[in-house]
Image (cartoon, rainbow, N blue to C red):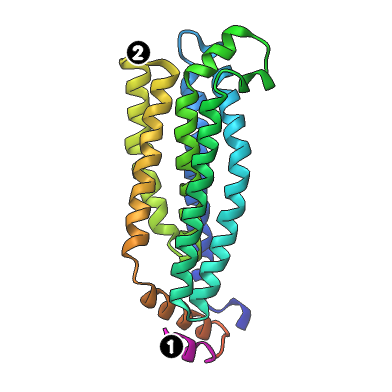
Amino acid sequence: MAAFNDMWAFVKLSLESAVMLCLEIWYLGMITVLTGDLQDAQIAVDSLGVCMNINGWEGMIFIGLNAAISVRVSNELGSGRPRAAMHAVIVVIGESLLIGLLCMALVLIFRDNFASIYTSDVELRQAVSKIAGLLGLTMVLNSVQPVLSGVAIGGGWQGLVAYINLGCYYIFGLPLGYLLGYKFNYGVGGIWAGMLCGVALQTLILLVIVWRTDWNAEAALASSRVRKWGGTEATKPLLEEN
């Protein structure tokens, strides 16, 4: 029965992680749902689909970085090395931002051509070209945001991020996208821009949280959990050195 000690702490963390990730994934899916009611829905949905596929290619990179930084942060904090955790966060955020900016530049340079990978329809390619700027901005934000989510997972902040996602995405971004797309008649670009504002707000809040984090306190908390759940006192000297 010892294996089931403190099981609720793990269940709670798992549920918080699930809610955090579901809120992010569902939010992106809502763009397509809202676009389906526009006047020229077929072109709007098709152009958005092309852009989301291109964005998905880039996203594969940052899913990997998300997993890498979450493991690195949790390992460093659990080992009592707050300075190493902080440096890892700074490096991966900078690296991700550079990759995102590079992807945005490529999209803007080839905005009139990259849709030909998917279609030969001239009207659809023109529609994609019109919203390529939003795709570029999305690539920049989606380069940093998954990494920050990975930091949150590594630090055990999933519950906090779930609330942030709920507020930024569904209370702010989604209504704003609806207003811009339908009430102000900006179409698919308005929907996307409004929802992108939600992502930008969430990213900004996470950056502030990471910037203001007391990594020494986080390392002390993580080390205490390691000792409580079967670790050793070997982490204590490492923590004191930092």
Q: Are marks 2 and 1 in contact (CB under 8 Å)?
A: no
The answer to whether 223 is drawn above or below residue 144 in the figure is: below
Range shown magenta: 233-242
Q: Residue at x 47, y 91 (%)?
A: 237
Q: Position of residue 158 (x, y in %)?
A: 45, 58
Residue that label 2 marks: 185
Please, what is the dominant secondary structure of the magenta stretch? helix
Which residue does the numbered mark 1 point to in the structure image?
A: 241
Q: Nearer the viewer, residue 65 or 229?
A: 65
Q: Looking at the image, can residue 97 be seen? A: yes
Residue at disc 1, secondary structure: helix
Can residue 44 be seen in the rendering of this structure? no
The x and y percentages for residue 150 are 51, 57
The CA distance from mark 2 to mark 1 is 59 Å
Q: Tell me which label, 2 or 1, sits earlier in the chain.
A: 2
Q: Which type of secondary structure does the marked residue at label 2 adopt?
A: loop
